[in-house]
Image (cartoon, rainbow, N blue to C red):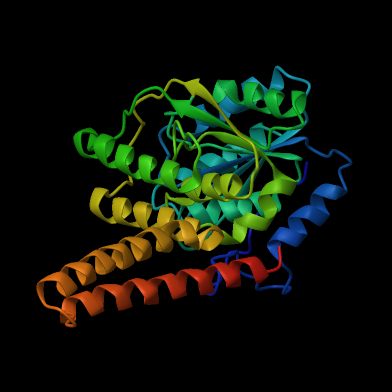
Amino acid sequence: MALVDTDPTAGLDGSDGSIGSNGSNGSDPIAAAMDADSADGVVPHVSVVLPCYNEEAHVLLEIQRICAALDATDYPYEVLAIDDASTDGTLEVLRKAEIEYASVKVVAFKRNGGAGTVRRIGSKMARGDIVVWTDADMSYPNERIPELVEMLDFDAGIDQVVGARKAEMGSHRLLRIPAKWVIRKIAEKLTNQKIPDLNSGLRAMRREVALPYLRLLPPGFSCVTTITLAFMSNQKNVVYIPIDYAKRAGKSKFRFVTDAYRYILQVLRMVMYFNPLKVLMPPALWLIGIGVVKAVFDLVVHPFRFAQNTALLILSGLIIASMALLADLIVRSRPE
C-alpha cells in the first residue's frame, strides 16, 4: 500500500479545516492519496480513522492492537493515522509504524485542527465501505472493532454501530456524569429515540451513508455527538453494543466548562438543523398559552384592559412560532 503524507509546507485550510494543498505541485493530498492507493490493486473494506495528538507513549501499542484484531479476520483494511500537529514525538512514532505495518498510512497536519476535523478529513480519505472511528488513548476496546464491522456486514439494515460505555472513566467524573446525563436526556427528548451513549468515540458506520453529514462535523469532541444525531434525525438505524471503557493513557484534552458548553450547544444546533419545530415550537406554545390565561385573568380583574406583560407574552410566543415555521420551511426546502 502506498504511503501518504502532506507536503511539509502544507497546512489546514482556514476556511473549512481541510488539509491544505501541496505547495510543490498544487495537488490535493486527499485526491493524491486516493490516486496512489488505487494503483496497488488492494481496496480495503474497512478504514480505521485514528486521530493522534500527543500520544507518543502509547500510540504504537494502540496501532498494534488494532492491526492484530483486523489481521485475525479476512477483512482487507487500512489504518489512517492522522497526526494533528502533535508537539511531542507522536509523528516520529507513527512514521516507524507506517514502515512496520503495510496497512498503516500516516497523514500529518501542520496545525491543530481538532478531533472533528481529523475524523471528517479521514472519513473522506477512507477507501473502505465501512469507516471506524476510535481514539488512540487506550481507553476503548479496539480489539472489538471486527465485531462492529461484522454487525454491519451481517445486517444491511444497520447503518452505524456504536460502543456504549458501561462506565465513565474520564477526568472530572463528578461533573461529567450528571452533565452528560442531562444532555443525553435532552437529545433523547428531541430525537424521540433511546440513546445509551451520546458521545462514544468507538463506532463503525457505512461510509456512503455518513458522507453527506461529514460537512456538519464541528472541529472538537462533539463531532461524535453530531454524527449520532445526524443519523438518527434522518431515520438511519443506529445500534448500540455495551463495551468496557478504561482510564485513558496520557493527559486528557477535555476541558469541562468549554467542551460541555459546546457539547450542549451542538445538540441543540443539530436538532435545529434537521427539526427546528422540536426546539422552537414548545416554548412558543407555552408563551402563547400562558399569555391567553393571563389575558382571561386580566379581563376578569380589569374588564376591557390587558396588562403590558400579557401582550408581551402573546407577542413573544407568536414571534417564536413564526420563526419555528420559517425554519421548518427552510429545512424542508433544502436539497438533500
- Quarter of the rendering occupied by the C terminus: bottom right
Q: Split into 4 quadrants, where in the image is the N terminus?
A: top right
- Residue 92 or residue 144, whichever sits in front: 144
Is any atom of residue 177 visible in this view? yes
Residue at the (41%, 57%) spot, across then down:
268
In the displayed structure, would residue 286 be above or below residue 150? below
Q: Position of residue 171 (x, y in %)?
A: 26, 36
Residue plotted at (44% across, 39% down)? 198
Q: Position of residue 29 (x, y in %)?
A: 69, 62
Q: Position of residue 301 (x, y in %)?
A: 10, 72
In the current view of this chain or complex, which residue is farthest to the top? 72
On the rendered structure, is 258 left or right of 130? left
- In terms of image quadrants, where is residue 68? top right
Query: In the displayed structure, would residue 64 be above or below residue 264?
Result: above
Please identify the residue farthest to the left as the structure is shown.
Answer: 301
Asked where in the image residue 248 lies, by quadrant, the reply is top left
